[in-house]
Amino acid sequence: MPLWKPLRATLAVIALTHAGTSLAEDNPTDCRESSAVTVWTSPARPVPGEPLRIMVVATDHAADGMTIIDDRGMGSPVRVTRRGGPPWSLEGEVRSFSATRPMQIEVHRDGETVGCRRLPMDSRTFSAGANPSPSWNRETEAFYSAWIETLFDAPASENLSFKSLEPVLRDPERNFLYDHLNQGEDARLPATPDCADLPYFLRTYFAWKIGLPVAFRACDRGTASRPPRCGPSTVDDRFTQGSASASRFTGLMRQIADTVHSGSARTALDDESTDFYPVALDRDSLWPGTIYADPYGHVLMIAKWLPQESSGSGTLMAVDAQPDNSVARKRFWEGNFLFASNPGAGPGFKAFRPLTSDSGHLRAPSNRWLAVHAPVAPYSDQQEGMDPDDFYATISKQINPQGLAPEAAYDAMLEALVEQIETRAGAVDNGESYLKQHQGAVVSMPSGAAIFETIGPWEDYATPSRDMRLLIALKVIAGLPEQMTHYPALFSLGGRSPEAASEDIRRRHEQSIAQRHIRYTRSDGRSWELSVADIFARRESLEMGYNPNDCAESRWGAAPGSEEYETCRRHAPPDQQAKMAQYRRWFQQTQRPTR
């Protein structure tokens, strides 16, 4: 988190490649921009006397720091928070912006000035991203990536979650585009996207703030034998015409939300009529803001990379939204990122297809063009037909290129599992709150595969998809010892044989799951503690624990007649229980049905 607390009216500066109104042309020898470091500003018209927030983003290498040079030539270093890589960023602040006295921001690396931006005296011309033809290029993509990382930044040990996207965007400490347009536009902005809408919402919000076009397509949902297919791209350039009101943003976002769905991200990897295209599984391609489409419809977005260090594992963090509109940050592992060869989906990591200008018209480029000219990540067919084990091994090597001690690998998995269980606890609590507010109501249950994809209260408060992922996660972590014997090259065994390391992890697993605990809220409002070992022991009960019409105790697998169960006061109707018994085999096999 930043070391400073910006005030309500803030000014954000992001050093990228071409941002802002350049003053370097006035005196190129005194303040020359780098090809990888320039300045963005927010709000578009800063308020004299208010703080100036600065973020330097480098696309080539991390910068060491920045200095503010005033109109007398006096330099003052700026206290910064460091993030990322790539893109790398520094964030800091100048306490009071002067509209009449120029200042200069210099960015340093290894004792050299690698970036510079002079801020003009006339605040009426001082704006972020002011250029005659706003476009999605490497500079704006890097700005977007740095912005995503800042939105969801927190220590890796923190279980970061929100009831919706609203508290994220309304927090000026997280959102340095907060009130960018000087309209108070964020104070009451509705922001409740679900998992499919979240990437579109953030992309469109960013475009609104800095004046970029957006594009989206209507797609079908595919079938069991083919991925979704999409129609022509709808390109909207309303934000490129000047400062737009919040109502214009919400109007467009409503149109997008009514058009896109989970199938929008699951298109075939070689399809060109899409909003997203697949990228290579390497660190240079997987910037924050890259999405992950799993084969069953869930969508996540990369939020942060933490490099591997000698003391522990590296981490890839992502965020997602749920049907109840909650937003949470999650670690990459098999329990959260499902990958499978599925004829009905094109899963994997994908980037937004950028818009390019062709004879004055904006269009979405082809995969062939993106393979050569993509602003950040070239089109790649690497994930096409990839074996799941190879997929996870490839990403693991990107997260921990030096390999990982078995104990560190297990501990990282356990942390991710506990996060997953705690997030489920919040989802169950949301269902309890809904039914307490609607006394006597029964949430209607769909039939067949629709239990995983529907609308209304069932989508908001039932947890079949979440519980399927949890059951998969339990299987994955329990299977780690066996993975070590099959894929020893992924681990740093320290001279041990794979069999010896596997046995060590089995013992560690038994001890650790008994020591880690979570709490959930029972029907009477009091909390109840469960160990992770309890969760493992209740796997069979969790196969039918997704129905919000059942009490919380039942959904957590409490045994009838036990002290824990005695506060249960609600059960799913008999016809729903019969359906759940029929569908139980899906959860036993941890395999979602085809549509």
Image (tube, rainbow, N blue to C red):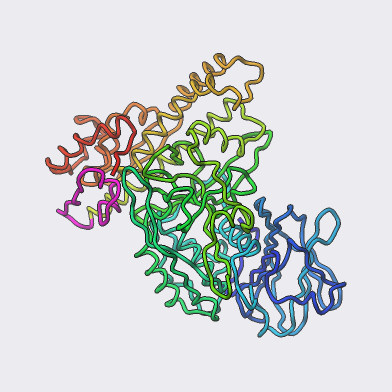
Is 291 located above or below residue 117 in the figure? above
Q: Residue furthest left?
A: 574
Q: Which residues are magenta?
A: 437-462
| Location of the C terminus (image quadrant) | top left
Residue 499 in the image, given as x and y percentages of width and height: 54, 14
Residue 419 in the image, given as x and y percentages of width and height: 45, 41
271 displayed left or right of 280: left
Q: Is residue 446 magenta?
A: yes
Is 359 located above or below residue 368 in the figure? below
Is 498 located above or below residue 583 in the figure? above
| Location of the N terminus (image quadrant) | bottom right
Mark yes or no: residue 202 visible: yes
Residue 331 in the image, given as x and y percentages of width and height: 51, 42
> What secondary structure is the magenta-colored segment mainly?
loop
Is 517 located above or below residue 361 in the figure? above
Q: Residue at x 41, y 42 (%)?
A: 422
Residue 416 in the image, given as x and y percentages of width and height: 48, 38
338 displayed left or right of 376: left
Mark yes or no: residue 152 visible: no
